[in-house]
Amino acid sequence: MLKTAGCGLAAITAGQSLYAASNAARGKRMGVVIFSYHLRNSSRNTSQRYPRFRDTIELLEHCNEYGAGGVQVGVNDWENVFARKVRDRREQLGMFLEGQIRLPKSRGDLAKFESTLKAAKEAGASVLRTAVGGRRYEQFDEIDGWKAMKSQAWKSFRLVEPLLAKHRVKIGIENHKDWRIPDLLEFMKGLSSEWIGICIDTGNSIALLEHPMETVEAFAQYAVTTHIKDMGVKEYEDGFLLSEVPLGDGMVDMKRVFEICEKANPNIQFCLEMATRDPLKVPCLTDKYWATFEKMESLQLARALSMIRKNESKQELPYITGRPQDERLRLEEKNIRQCMDFAEERLGLTG
């Protein structure tokens, strides 16, 4: 009996060792996107228990406490002196840094953009994320507004591409509930630059009636960074509700996401964007929603509604409206840490 038990224990131990080795083999930890702390970092936050972060250094130190591998944070208007302080503390903590940056609209904005670019590079960020639009179906009332935004994006990226190449910094444009797959692929192929890629957001494109795995598979070849999020969905009278939920609680196949992204770019960092907020309304059954599209796409809508019904959350989607401030902030912290635990235990993000 002891011999049999010993064999069983050995098998369990071997299995655990293989699992641990598999985790360690990934060699990276999950980073945190600053918007994960949009409640805590708000100018309206007056909490004593969960005060605003004074700067990026304090954010780095806080995220390091629970094992985050780095942060993705705004770098606009950084000065070199502060950038060096960020670099020094980041290196002490063994963490990575990615930046978020605004694009210039004209040549007159290029000097400021380059100054920010150099400061970000000084701090250790060789990858930046940017976005050019908001929620397409809310931002514009007609197709001309969307086309003007696309035109400005072409201009801005052509302006910055030589500077990105000069400083050897890559920038990823996020699918920010604005670009559908054909739009962004056309954009990438037209720019055709090794310094311009995509920040894959694993949840946003559901709002444009695209399946998250379809989005990831289409964009992976251009991926330079990520916004990792899991999504809960429920139908409502004008379409469906879309809500960030802790990793593993939603409809996104995270293991598959990681496999696809790392196959395309082994050096890619996975950055958590866990926004604790009320569900967003996606009014895909209204006329206004379709105003920025060239034509009504009945097949796309049918597939999307089928996807929503198939993946509809069995539990109520989370709401924070009406909760006391500290309760909202406590929940924000809890959600982030729950996601980090899932990333370590289930996705092998240790290193």
Image (cartoon, rainbow, N blue to C red):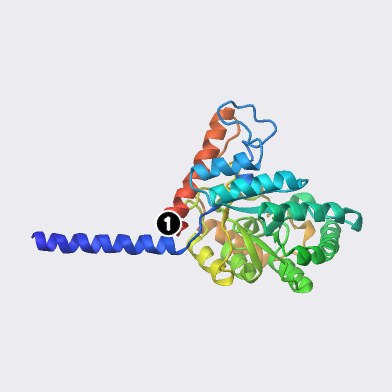
- Residue 159 lies, in percent from the top left, at 85, 63
Q: Which part of the image, by quadrant, shows the N terminus?
A: bottom left
Q: Of the residues shown, which amino acid type is indicated by label 1?
A: Arg
Horizontal and vertical percent position of residue 229:
56, 53
Asked if residue 278 can be seen in this view, the reply is no
Q: Secondary structure at mark 1?
A: helix
**Residue extending farthest left:** 1
Between 146 and 21, the one nearer to me in the picture: 21
| Image: 136 above or below 319 | below
Vertical order, 124 against 211 (above or below): above
Point out residue 186 in the picture as x, y percentages from the top left corner: 75, 71
Task: Write down the residue under mark 1.
Answer: 346
Q: Nearer the viewer, residue 259 or 21?
A: 21
Mark 1, residues whose alpha carbon is within 10 Å: few (<14), some, or many (≥20)?
some
Left of 110 or right of it: where is 197? left
How many numbered discs? 1
**Can see residue 186?**
yes
Whether 189 is drawn above or below 331: the answer is below
User: Which residue is located at x 67 percent, y 35 percent?
Assistant: 42
Which residue is at the front of the view, 245 or 330? 330
The image quadrant that residue 163 belongs to is: bottom right
Is 269 on the left or on the right of 26, as rendered?
Answer: right
Task: Tell me residue 309's x, y (percent).
Answer: 53, 57
| Residue at 61 percent of width and 39 percent of height | 58
